[in-house]
Amino acid sequence: MKSIKYEHSVRRMKSTNNEIQVLDSFITERYNESTRQWVPRWKEEFTYLPDGCIEQVIYGSWVKPSGNGEKFRETYSYDSNKNLIEAIGMKWDTISMDWVNDHKYEFLYDDNENLIEKAAYFWNKTDNVWNNDFKNNYSFNESGNLSQEIYIVWNKSDNDWVNYNKCIYFYEEEILTHYIRFQWNESTEKWDTAYRNEIFWDDNGCEIEGKVYKWDTLSSDWSILSNYYTPRNDDGNIIQYLNYGWNSSSTEWINNYKYDYTYDSQGDLILFISYYWDPGENQWKHYDRSTYHYSEQNITGFLRNNLQVNVYPNPSYQFISVEVAGTTNPLYFELFDLQGKEILSVKFIERIDIDVRHLKTGIYVYRVIYNNQIITGEIINVE
């Protein structure tokens, strides 16, 4: 998008045939307070096409000592411009010992290669057909910036699409300043105001602070929910995320969560550690960590992209924030449960805050899509 430029984050190779470092896999572990050991929870493995596009992702939960848990696979198809046009998800069937259909996504673009629709389907085992699930529709302003996103779901009873939520984005001099989320009210058949997210940037176009508000229907005004800060290194990569919640009773900010990020010499994320605040012991405690593994691969005409994806807080209980530096085009955030079912899908620019209070306690897998790049990870939600 034209809102923020990150030319320094993208490196183009001088040759059309290059040896570059690409992500092979990552493993997420949970910290066990009793044993003081890290326990494996999730793993993802990636394979690539010769042009650097993601060809396939295999992922699964680590629910047994041997590491053999539920496994899923997604394969991807692209158009001639390397735009993702289809993703097919399959689940490993332990009875037939084969991959079986689970879910599918189709992507539609306008003449400017802006994604204007994403359609999701689930596999109907009884009829052996793909059934409608949900859609995301996107609109853009005259400057090419994302202006509105509407999420609709398929109503089986009425056999029709129905509104669910929408988001409107606001800019000043093509810089995203805030966005407002609305929830569809079936009774009034109108959009109810829900949340407001404000974003603050430094002179280099890096997000350094954010605030989340909730619409108070009694006072007809916004009430503050949380605040966060994102310190960065000299390369502009976030090295820590600090989240604070507002205590209306004591009228003060209290610690919620924090994350630490470690990078290698090339600026690639190699270690992510999350902590939660223990008010009883008045200290930070480990929650989970992810280690990222890379290898050198020979890619033809590959654009080296140093995307740094930050999803926080983790664990979450009200909202999750998704931040991606190094982007000039729209991004797409998808969230799945451990059965591979998609929970939500949203489009955003640079950063977005997502309400997850409706989710049950458990582990969820996310995926961020940017151009031909797919970055995945795991979050834990606490009711």
Image (cartoon, grey):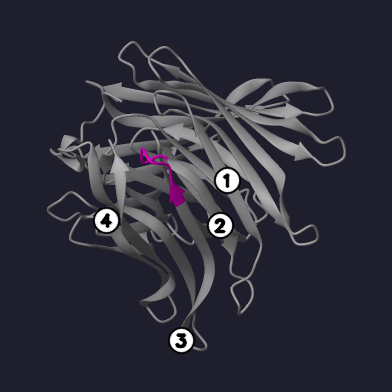
Q: Check residue 74 in the rendering and tell me which mark sits there, or answer none.
A: 1
Q: Regarding mark 3 in the picture, which secondary structure is present there?
A: loop
- Left or right position of 19 against 235: right
**Which amino acid type is marked by label 4?**
Asp
- Can you say whether 98 is above or below 178 in the image? below
- Earlier-in-chain disc, 2 versus 1: 2
Tell me, yes or no, whether the two marked residues, 2 and 1, touch with CB atoms within 8 Å.
yes
The residue wearing badge 4 is 268
- Can you say whether 191 is above or below 126 in the image? above
The residue wearing badge 2 is 59
- Earlier-in-chain disc, 3 versus 4: 3
Tell me, yes or no, whether the two marked residues, 3 and 4, touch with CB atoms within 8 Å.
no
Q: Regarding mark 2 in the picture, which secondary structure is present there?
A: strand
| Circle 3 or circle 1, nearest the eye | 1
- Earlier-in-chain disc, 2 versus 3: 3
Q: Regarding mark 1 in the picture, which secondary structure is present there?
A: strand
Q: Residues within 10 Å of mark 1 (few under 14, many from 20)?
A: many
Mark 3 and mark 1: span between their CA atoms? 34 Å
Q: Position of residue 130 (x, y in %)?
A: 74, 32
The N terminus, quarter of image: top left
Quadrant housing residue 67: bottom right
Tell me, yes or no, whether the two marked residues, 3 and 1, touch with CB atoms within 8 Å.
no
**Which amino acid type is marked by label 2?**
Tyr
Magenta stretch bounds: 47-53
Mark 3 and mark 4: span between their CA atoms? 28 Å
The residue wearing badge 3 is 36
Q: Regarding mark 4 in the picture, which secondary structure is present there?
A: loop
Look at the image and tell me whether residue 341 can be seen: no
**Which amino acid type is marked by label 1?**
Glu
